[in-house]
Image (cartoon, rainbow, N blue to C red):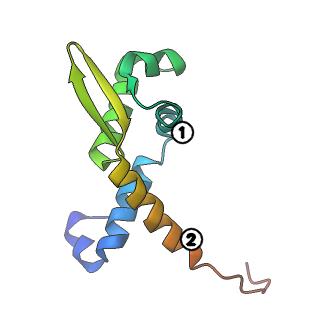
Amino acid sequence: MGATKTEEFTQADIVIAKYAKALAHPARIAILRILLERTSCICGDIVEELPLSQSTVSQHLKELKEAGLIKGDIEGKKVCYCIDERAWKEAQQLLQVMFSRFTSCNTTCC
């Protein structure tokens, strides 16, 4: 979607799309699972748990951070990542609202 067309969508739809894009790779889901199991995590620990190179993990962390789902603090030469609680709750609420709108149509059309 071109950037010029985003004004034609609701702010909620734009935010949901931002979070969905960040969630659209299995490596990012795995990273989020690791972070959810801990209160914080140093990037090196994440690399040890995934079958990916340091640079690939860093790229996925960057995507999650740009979407706002995680945050990171520099501690010396390492960056400590954790879930951004505010954004996590926002994503959860927006997705819940969207999913709760589904009602079965009880037809065999699809």
* Secondary structure found at label 1: helix
Quadrant of the frame with the N terminus: bottom left
Q: Amino acid at mark 1?
A: Pro
In the displayed structure, 44 sits above or below 33; it is above
- Residue 106 image-quadrant placement: bottom right
Q: Nearer the viewer, mark 2 or mark 1?
A: 2
Please state if 9 lies on the left or on the right of 75 as rendered: right
Q: Is the residue under label 1 in contact with that under label 2 (CB below 8 Å)? A: no
For the point 72% across and 86% down, which residue is it?
A: 105
Which residue is at the front of the view, 83 or 105?
83
Q: Amino acid at mark 2?
A: Phe
Q: Which residue is mark 1?
A: 26
Relative image position of residue 18 (x, y in whole percent): 35, 57
For the point 27% across and 44% down, which residue is it?
A: 66
Relative image position of residue 54 (x, y in whole percent): 38, 17
For the point 49% across and 65% down, which residue is it?
A: 95
Q: Which residue is mark 2?
A: 99
Relative image position of residue 61 (x, y in whole percent): 35, 33
In the displayed structure, 44 sits above or below 4; it is above
